[in-house]
Image (cartoon, rainbow, N blue to C red):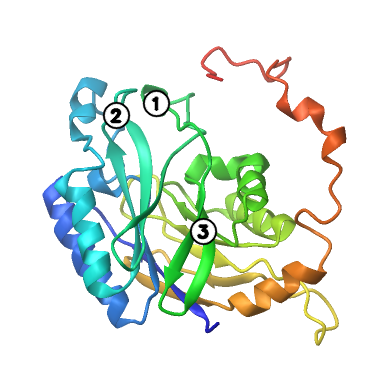
Amino acid sequence: MSKIKIALLQISPCGSTEENKKKGHLYCRLAKEAGADIALFPEMYSNGYDIYGRPFDVWRNDAVEKSSDFVQSFGLLAKSLDMAICVTFLESSHKGPRNTALLFDRFGEERLCYSKVHTCDFDVERNLAPGDDFYVSKLDTAKGTLNVGVMICFDREFPESARILMLKGAELILVPNACPMEINRLSQLRGRAYENMLAIATCNYPIGVPDCNGGSNVFDGVAYLPELPSSRDTCILQAGEGEGIYTAELDLDMLRRYRESEVHGNAYRHPKKYGLLTETAVEKPFVREDCRQ
């Protein structure tokens, strides 16, 4: 398999769903011109994650259905470009609005639709309906097939998110994001890639979008190579602050060889001893009245 090129669309929203669609299409075409096999948007791109400082009854009207023109137009675009696209949107659902990402393959077919499980219930995201599960799907690219999962922003804060995706077979996790990329969040992403021996690609909004600063990144998860005397930097891309398309080539053959021989991931776990992890009780000092199970 050749290297898979991932394009992170670190772009600012425009102020309306229709304008965001047009700009998103433009940048997907530019990503294809740059040789991308997969294009990834920042979190909730359909409305630019514009849910702060506005009444819930107002911004909930920004929600679009999965069958909407906004979402499905990216499926048609993926087919015309022969390129996978992971588009993000505020989804209208019977459970309430959701923070959702939908991955189309290069044939324009839906491969997975994931809604953010770990909503930020301490803030305005308490108005969102959490997702139900984590999903992994085989993604056919022009350079071969790989197993892809998705988690969104705050999901990154919980090792269980990436762990369950690894256990379901993920080789690459796509992470739409809308928050400052600072050393601790970068360290979380680095850690999730390292401990699960998989690649993680995160797309953030550029500086100028409230509470965002660019820094989109890719960690390939390969910490050791036999020809190197010590560990290597798993970060193969960290974008600057500005708007743009940032691309990284993921060497999937190298990653797969590494996963077959190294000690992390699911090689030496003791799951029978982890029963407490599935208990739902929360004890002090972690009790929060706004927490939803």
In the image, residue 273 lies at what x, y percent?
Answer: 87, 34
Q: Is residue 97 above or below residue 73?
A: above
Residue at x-position 72% and y-position 26%: 278
Q: Is residue 202 left or right of residue 40?
A: right
Residue lying at 23% horizontally and 37% vertically, measured from the top left: 65
Query: Marks 2 and 1: which is nearer the front?
Result: 2
Which of pointers 2 and 1 lies earlier in the amino acid sequence? 2
Q: Earlier in the sequence, mark 3 or mark 2?
A: 2
Relative to residue 233, is residue 216 depicted above or below? above
- Residue topped by disc 2: 93
Q: Amino acid at mark 3?
A: Val
Q: Is mark 2 in CB contact (under 8 Å) with mark 1?
A: yes
| Residue where numbered disc 1 is placed | 129
Nearer mark to the viewer, of 3 and 1: 3
Q: Dot 1, crowdedness within 10 Å: few (<14), some or many (≥20)?
A: many
What percent of the width, then of the height, locates residue 262?
A: 81, 67
Work out how far the residue at label 3 is from the one at label 2, CA to CA, in angstroms: 24 Å
* Tag shown at residue 90: none
Q: Position of residue 283 (x, y in %)?
A: 73, 15
Q: Write the residue at 86% across / 53% down.
A: 268
Is residue 15 something that shows in the picture?
Answer: no
Q: Which residue is mark 3?
A: 148
Work out whether residue 230 can be spotted.
Answer: yes
Give the alpha-carbon distance from disc 2 to disc 1, as whole Å: 9 Å
Mark 3 and mark 1 residues within 8 Å of each other at the beta carbon: no
**What SS does tag 1 mark?**
loop
